[in-house]
Image (cartoon, grey):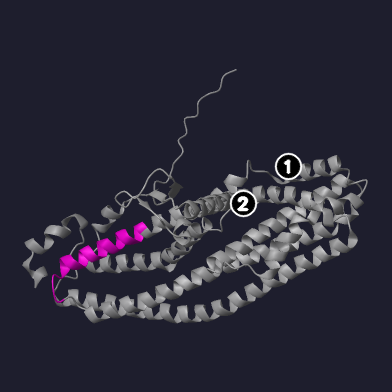
Amino acid sequence: MGCMASSQRVHVLRVPTLSWREASKAETVTAALARLDAEIAAGERARPAARLAVLSAELDSVHQVNYNARNLAALNWLRMIYCAALKTQKYIVRSDPEMVWWDGNIPNSRGVATAVSAVSIIRPPPPKEITSFEETTSSVTDKEAYAKTIHQLFVSLDLYKRPVLATENEDFVANVNRKEMHRLELAWLRTRRSEMQHERRVLHTQILRNRALYAQLQQLLETLWTEDRPGVTLEAALRRAKALRDALAAVSARLRAAAGYAHAAARHVDDALPAWKITSLGKSGWERTNTCADACVLLVQARCLERSARRVLVAPAAPRAARSLRLSLDYAFTDALHDHKHQKATEVFLQFKETVVQLINSIHQVLLNNLENLAVAEKEVSRLRRELRASRAHGLVRRGLADLRYEPKALTPLADTNPALGS
């Protein structure tokens, strides 16, 4: 059985879509100046430049950490070579600024072989944070694999049935747990890096659009006034006000980013504490290990977020609570088998949360003062922008160019064809 085709037509309302070039043909020069200035102000209201500066600095500092085990081994090897060179009065040959080796067969020849000090020899390139994790980490793990690895370790060592052995093997378990947490941190770093790179591309697009609008505005101004442009003093005052506003916005963006990281770290600790408290209440060893793994994953993420907050604030030194948290996380699975160690670890987690809360309060105090100053600077920029816009409009009216049509393609030859524009 077939179906009859419908003969009714669906009426669709077509909205005219005009590009900015087509729309600009119907506007005057005065309206074009006001529109471009308003679009530039709207683009600057989101402050993409300040946020981009914070993201770029954070991405750069993500790759800067202390030397890992591989770099330390290379440094020790270089120290041994240097000591051997001093004893045998041989030379250390440097042919590349990032590579140093020793060859006893090459004497002084044209300054290539030079005896350098221990301070100058130990200058390897700065290591990268994600690279350092990748050098010591084989693969990325997830929460389920993390719990299964620790569970298999406890089963093989028979720690569930004989908790006394947990104290004797706590260092071994801590080393395994530390490697697994390195994998978790590596996964978090990769995810966060991809998010920041995506946000940076979006901010780049916004900044390029603002620059294009500013270039159009400058081209229009240079075409209308080759000299004696009205509001020159207002332009200088506006530049100074924008510089102050941008400086305050940069500080505000940095404080907001740090506060966001700190708030997220506090939330992760709040989510981890209930899971940690019920660790000792599990009916089986797998339930206790799985619950402890859930708490450790949240606490590792909280530690990464707290480190990110310090990274944004350019405060690389970790507080004592953060160092205590890292040590407690290493021994979390064995401490969960003993009540007194479990309680001590709980106190360490609470101290870390208090430190994060203190950081949040400190950031908020500075941020409130900064926002007040930023609001005043923003009002000053808006006032100067309105006065400058009015001054330019009055200048066009005095010259009789208020009704001149705005055509972007004709901006370049406009001053040559119309002598009134150059006067």
Q: Which of 196 and 189 is in front in this view?
A: 189
Left or right: where 15 falls relative to 179: left
User: Is 257 placed above or below 201 here?
Assistant: below
Q: What residue type is labelled 2?
A: Trp
Whether pointer 1 and pointer 2 mark residues with C-beta atoms closer than 8 Å, the reply is no
Decide whether residue 224 is among the magenta residues: yes
Q: Which of 346 and 167 is in front in this view?
A: 167
Residue occupying the point 45% across, 70% down: 250
Residue occupying the point 69% across, 72% down: 355
Left or right: where 414 falls relative to 261: left
Residue 333 at what x, y percent from top left?
81, 53
The part of the chain drawn in magenta is 208-228
Residue 402 at what x, y percent from top left?
19, 71
Image quadrant occupied by the N terminus:
top right
Residue occupying the point 51% across, 69% down: 254
Q: Which amino acid does label 1 sit on?
A: Ala
Residue 264 at what x, y percent from top left?
65, 63
Q: Mark 2 points at which residue?
A: 188
Q: Mark 1 points at which residue?
A: 145
Image quadrant occupied by the C terminus:
bottom left
